[in-house]
Amino acid sequence: HLTELCGEVRVFDNGFKGALPTELGDLDQLVALHAYDNEINGAIPSELQDMTALRKLDLSGNDLTGCIPTELGELENLVFLKLSENSLSCAIPVELASISSLTDLRLSENLLTGTIPEQIIS
């Protein structure tokens, strides 16, 4: 039963294609997901908010599109969030500022609009 997976999943640099499955949200004990440098496309599923133990999320270097889900602000244990080198658009959600444990936020090389929310900077 993969829903009881509680360590790290490292599936980077494999050429995986397609969308991220919404069922990833069922992995509520997972502490790290490293799925960078693949060909994952589509939107980041809002169901990732259910991965409550997650400390590291790296989805960089894919073909992700759409907005950064505001629901990621619910990941209160998240320390590292890397979404750079995708085609994410919209503004940076202010909800990310509510993740008090977040110390490393990387959003470069996307199509983001607007300004960096003041709450994230302070």
Image: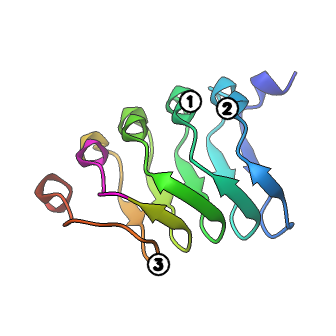
Amino acid on which disc 3 is placed: Glu
For residue 88, side relative to residue 4 (left or right) = left
Identify the coloring: rainbow
Q: CA distance from mark 1 to mark 3?
A: 24 Å
Q: Quadrant of residue 24?
A: top right
The disc, 2 or 3, on the residue closer to the chain's N-terminal end is 2
Residue 85 is situated, as x and y percent measured from the top left of the image, at 55, 74
| SS for dot 3 | loop
Question: How many residues crowd around disc 1 within 10 Å: few (fewer than 14), some, or many (20 or more)?
Answer: some
User: Visible in this render: residue 27?
Assistant: yes
The disc, 1 or 3, on the residue closer to the chain's N-terminal end is 1
Q: Quadrant of the C terminus?
A: bottom left
The residue pinned by badge 3 equals: 109
Location of residue 43 with respect to 49 vertically, above or below: below
Residue 69 is situated, as x and y percent measured from the top left of the image, at 43, 42
Residue 121 is situated, as x and y percent measured from the top left of the image, at 17, 62
Q: Quadrant of residue 7?
A: top right
The residue pinned by badge 2 equals: 22
Amino acid on which disc 1 is placed: Glu
Question: How many residues crowd around disc 3 within 10 Å: few (fewer than 14), some, or many (20 or more)?
Answer: some
Give, as a single range, the part of the protein colored magenta: 90-96
For residue 75, side relative to residue 48 (left or right) = left
Is residue 30 magenta-colored?
A: no
Residue 17 is situated, as x and y percent measured from the top left of the image, at 82, 58
**Residue at the limit of the structure toward the bottom, as seen here:** 109
C-beta proximity under 8 Å, tags 2 and 1? yes
Location of residue 44 with respect to 13 vertically, above or below: above
Q: Residue at x 77, y 23 (%)?
A: 3
Amino acid on which disc 2 is placed: Thr
